[in-house]
Structure formats: C-alpha cells, structure tokens
Image (cartoon, coloured by chain):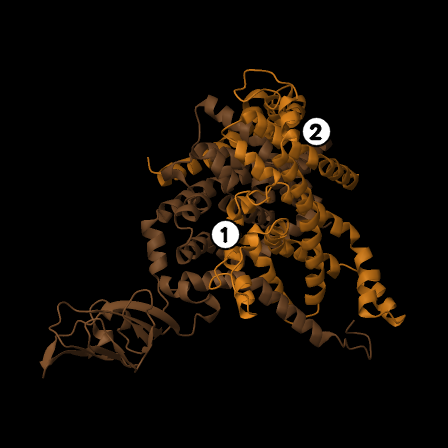
Amino acid sequence: MDNIAGQKSSLSLVTNIAVLLIVIAWLIPTVGLFVSSFRDRDQIAASGWWVAPFSVELTYRTRADATPTEQGNLFVIEGNIFESEEVRESFEDGESSIAAYGLRGREPGAFEAGTEAENRDGGTIQVNADGSYVYTSPEPIDGAPRVYFVAETPPQFTLDNYRTVLTADNMDRAFINTLTVTIPATIIPILIAAFAAYALAWMDFPGRGLLIATVVGLLVVPLQLALVPLLNLHNQLGIGQSFVGIWLAHTGFGLPLAIYLLRNYMVGLPRDIIESAKVDGATDFQIFTKIILPLSFPALASFAIFQFLWTWNDLLVAKVFLPSAGDAAVMTVKIADDLLGSRGGDWGILATAAFVSIAVPLLVFFTMQRYLVRGLLAGSVK
Amino acid sequence: MSPVIQGIITIIIGVGGCVGYFYFANLFIDKVLFPARGVNAGRNINRANMIRPWIFLFPAMFALGLYLMYPVVGSFFRSLYDRSGDEFVGLGNYARLFNNPDFRQAFLNNILWALVVPAGATFLGLVIAQLTDRLRWGNIAKSLVFMPMAISFVGASLIWRFVYAQDGDIGIINAIRFYFGAEEGIDPLQIPFWNNFLLMIILIWIQTGFAMVILSAALRGIPEETVEAAIIDGANPFQVFFKIKVPQIMGTIVVVWTTITILVLKVFDIVYTMTGGNFGTEILPSFMMDFMFRDDGQATAVAFVIMLVVLPVMVWNIAQARKEMR
C-alpha cells in the first residue's frame, strides 16, 4: 500500500495503539506471575502485584521490650518500636513509618500514630510515626507488653521463594526428572524419523504413497486412545511405569509429526545433488549421512524444538507413564498435583514454581524462534 | 540408579543403537547378503535397493504401529469389556456413558470448546497478523504474542489463576471489580456456564500466536497487484482486508482452524489444573482421566468417542495430503 502515490494509511496511528494494547493484554498475566515470584509472602497477601513497586501497609506484632524505668510514681518504657526484638529484622533499612497501632490482635490499627491511648494496665501508651513510643503504667510492669502496629513498608523483593521452591519442595528433583524425560525423548525420535523421512522422500518402492497417507492420518490420532493399551503393554513387558516407558511413549507419539515435517523438507532439496552423488557411486547410506542430514539441519532443529517443548510441557503422558508416587514426578505433575493441593494459597510459591518450569522453554523459544517459525510454516503452508 | 545416569545411558544406547542398526543393516545387505560383485553383481544391487527402503523405514514403522495404530484397535476392544477386562459387555460401556449426565455435559462442553477456541484463536491471529504487517516494531509484537506457545498448559493455567483469583489482591478481575465499588470478591471459575469460556480464553491466549505466525506468512504471500488494484478502485482498508485478502488465504485459514480443532480435543491440562472438572467445566479428555487407573473399560470408551469426533478431520487431512502429492 505504501508504494501508491498519495495513499498514506490514515489508520496508522490507530493501528499502532491497537497493537500496543493487544501486546499489553497478552503480557499482563505473565508479568503478574513474574513479579509475584519475587515478592515477599506478606506483601503478596497485602497488595496486588500491579502496585508492587509502592509501599504497602503491613501489620506487625511485637512487644514494647525496652527496659522499664521508674519515673516518679509511674513505671515507664521508652524506646523505638522498630528496634524491638520481634520485628527488628524487617526494618533494618529504617525507612518505614507507622500509620496506626493497637493493643489487641483484633484491632491492630485501633489508634492513629501520634495519639495517646489508654492501656490495659491503667496507664497510657503513645506510638509516634517514627516508631518511638512511651508506655506508662502506675504499677510495676511485668513482662514486655504486646503492641500491634500498621506500618508503611517499602516494597521488598526477595529470592526467598526461589530458595524455598528449589530446596524444600523437591522441585530441584522434579527439574532433573523433567530433563531426564525430555532429552532422550527429543533425540531418539529425530534419528528414527530422519531415516524414515529420507526413505519416503527419495527412495522408490511400492506402497510409498500409502505410507505417507498413513503418517498424515496418524498426525491427528488422539493421545488418549493410546494410554490404556500401552500402559497394559508396558506392564506386561515389565517396563511398567518408568522412564524407559515414557521415553518410548514420547518417541512413538512424536514420530508422525517428525516424519511429516522432515519429509516435507527433504522433498524440497534439489534433485541434482542427490543424483550426481549417486552417479559418483555413493550409497544411500552415504547420501543420507553426508548430504541429506547436513542440508536438513533447519528442519531437524525445528522439530527438535517442537518435541522439546512438547515433552517438557507435557502433563498427560507423564501422569500415565511415570509412577505417581514421589521421586519420579516431573515439574508439571509436581505443580498440578502436589503444589496446587498443599500450597494452594501460597501464591508466591506457586508463581515461583510455575516460573521455574517455564523458564527453560521460554529461553529455548526466544533463542530459537527462527527455526520454530520455519518448522510451523513447513508444516502447514504450501 | 540415579535417573540422570540412567538418562545418559539411555541416550547412548538409544542413539548408538539407532545409528548402529542403520549402519550395520546397510553393511549387511551390501557386503553379505547381496554383494555387488561376482556373477550376480547387477541383480544383487537391484535386490539390495529393493530391501533398503524397508531397513530405513522399519524402526519408524514399528514404533508407529505399536504406539499409534495398535492402540486404536486395542482401545476399541478394551472398551467392549467391563472394568476388570474379563467380561464382554458389548457396547455396554458406551451405553453407560451416554446415560451419565456428566458425560453428556462433558460432550457438550467439548463441542463448545471445539467451536469457540479455533474460531477465537484464528480470528485474533488473523487480526493481529494484519495489524502488525506494516508496523516497524511488528516483529517484536508478534514475538510477544507468540510467546505463550512455549509455556506449558499447566504453567499457563497458573498464570491465569493470577487473573481469575477470588482475592482482590491477587486476581485482576476482582481487583477491577473492587475498584468500581464491589463489596465482595467472586470466584469467576464458579459462575455456571460462563466459566467454560474463561477456561477457553486460556487456550485462545496460547494458540493465537500459532495462528498469527502462519496467517502472517500467508498474508505476505498475497500478490501485491490484487491489493493495489483494489485500492485504485477505491476500496477502503476494511474492504481490502475482508474482500481481497481473506478470500485469497482461505485455504491457510482452514488449515489453521483444523489444526487448532484437533489440539483442542486433546487438551486436558487446563481444566484439570483450574477446576478439576468441577462447576460444570468437565470436557472429554479430563472426564477420561477420572476413569483412568480405575475403570479401563469406560476410560477407553471415552477415548474412542474422542477418536470418533476427530475422525472427520483425519479423513479430510489425508484427502488433502493425497491431493498435494499428485
């Protein structure tokens, strides 16, 4: 359109804004997860991730534990609430201010900061915005009195969630399990499929057309159909629910797409190269390893990415072909079955676990996107 | 044995086995079975070349046969037997399914999914492909919309829990409602009927990128002259898009649509993670998982129903592939 004289699209500003809005809408959920995974547990509960860079009002519980002194006929505790033992760690950077305080857990913010209130001992208490407080009592103070307060707390970003997820929740094990499932399940089908694709693309034999049609048909066979018969078969063979079983299953399920993609690509390679190699006396095996494989690298890469993403992200096959108990769980199963149950309300942990599980695919995706797109196009656009 | 070592050994055995199989099988027919020398050299070369394709194909055919073709038959026969697998019940499992209101619900929901998700993803993908087509930062925008493709369905479900959560400090929907003065948080996933659509949005979010990438390539392939001619004839941008561009890429749109439809009929993760099939959101794949490990007869029956639903798409796919090969 741009090359037509006098025609400048008047919609260009609208287009820019529309695309910007779409992209933002697309990213918001993921950004929410990402931000939440770095937030402190209390802060997640107190405010939404969209206000994460701002201060939050959090409630704290502590004791007025400075040393009491006797002033006239009153017993007085004077000190700074931020320095009391129970909350000292949370306020080390010292930039907080108190909004309100209280003496009972049910009303932690009953009195505004800077006002004086009556305490249970019959004396008074006053907590100021800067944390300084004065507690008086007509009688000797027995033990440090409870004080609750609501403080403006600066945003806190921590790696604690990651530490918890990667150590306490067995996610490190699940991560390794996922890798263990994924790598063989990616490499083996590529090898098998490459030979088959070469035969279907460049060798002449009766029944070739039928085989290609079969592969296309098998592309859409629903996975669900395979679960029960194959699990029974594995049990009879003695493989049972194990890593070997899931590798074989992923290999079988990945093959149709692998053969289809690779064959489509190999058919497009120039006939001359292959025929001149044949004339020079190369065997089919040599043609395949020395000419076809190196030339097909883009297609091999794109299928490898597909299969990697698919096996990494898979939940169904892992649930059926790996033992359900404990040690063999992959990350998706771990999250869906364990964490959502036991840590259902712990949003920081959930976000972190999810982010750990999607980090590797995202990395692969953004570095290898070129091949992925090429593979997609080879599969569906002629 | 640690799974890591086991994995490494498997890679070596698997890869080494494959390479060794191909190499030695080739060596065997060339040197031992049909050596290309002596009186029968010519005949032997021909014979070796007749057998070679099958050597190349054998592992793939074996795996495909065992892991995809046998299960179709195996599942069907298993679905004719009862729970323990001993007693033949004919179509009894199917009859029980169709009398089960949960199954009918799952079936109807599944049809809804198969209609809404491909339509939504294809439409959005097409619109975004067109909008980003001439944009200077179009490729970045596309890359970001494409990103959810890399995320697992489980991960995506967790991501969207942060949108749908009942707590106004977690879920964006409730946060917006509170902002406009709502008193109490609602759980969007418990609203009957409409919760299905909230789950579908997740899959649309994932699949739009796929549709966009393919349709964007198709849009690029449209001959420039047709568009220019339409503009000279006074067509406005909307007319150009709907009357000139869309009809020309109709074939690709159909391919994208069917591909997503097939995918929709397999996805069980989202429903499983978000609602566990409660609140009327059950679909066939998640319904099947309820029977898995407990009643193989009914589980395979559900799987076979899914197969029947996919069958027309499969036939159409094969017909297309054969047409192309001619």
To which residue does mark 2 refer? A205
Q: Are marks 1 and 2 in contact (CB under 8 Å)?
A: no
Q: Is residue B217 above or below residue A95?
A: above
Mark 1 or 2: in front is 1
Secondary structure type for disc 2: loop
Q: Position of residue A64 (x, y in %)?
A: 20, 72
Q: Position of residue B44 (x, y in %)?
A: 64, 22
> Identity of the amino acid at label 1?
Gly
> Identity of the amino acid at label 2?
Phe
Q: Is residue B263 above or below residue A5?
A: above
Q: Position of residue A35 (x, y in %)?
A: 45, 64
Secondary structure type for disc 1: helix
Q: Which of A244 and A345 lies nearest the eye of the viewer?
A: A345
Q: Which shade is chain A?
A: brown
Q: Which shade is chain B?
A: orange
Where's the C terminus of chain B, which quadrant?
Answer: top right
Q: Which of A127 and A125 lies nearest the eye of the viewer?
A: A125
Q: Which of A185 and A132 lies nearest the eye of the viewer?
A: A132
What distance separates the C-alpha of mark 1 from that of mark 2?
A: 46 Å
Indicate which disc residue B155 carries: 1
**Chain under numbered label 1:** B
Specify whether A173 is left or right of B185. Answer: left
Q: Label 2: few (<14), some or many (≥20) within 10 Å?
A: some
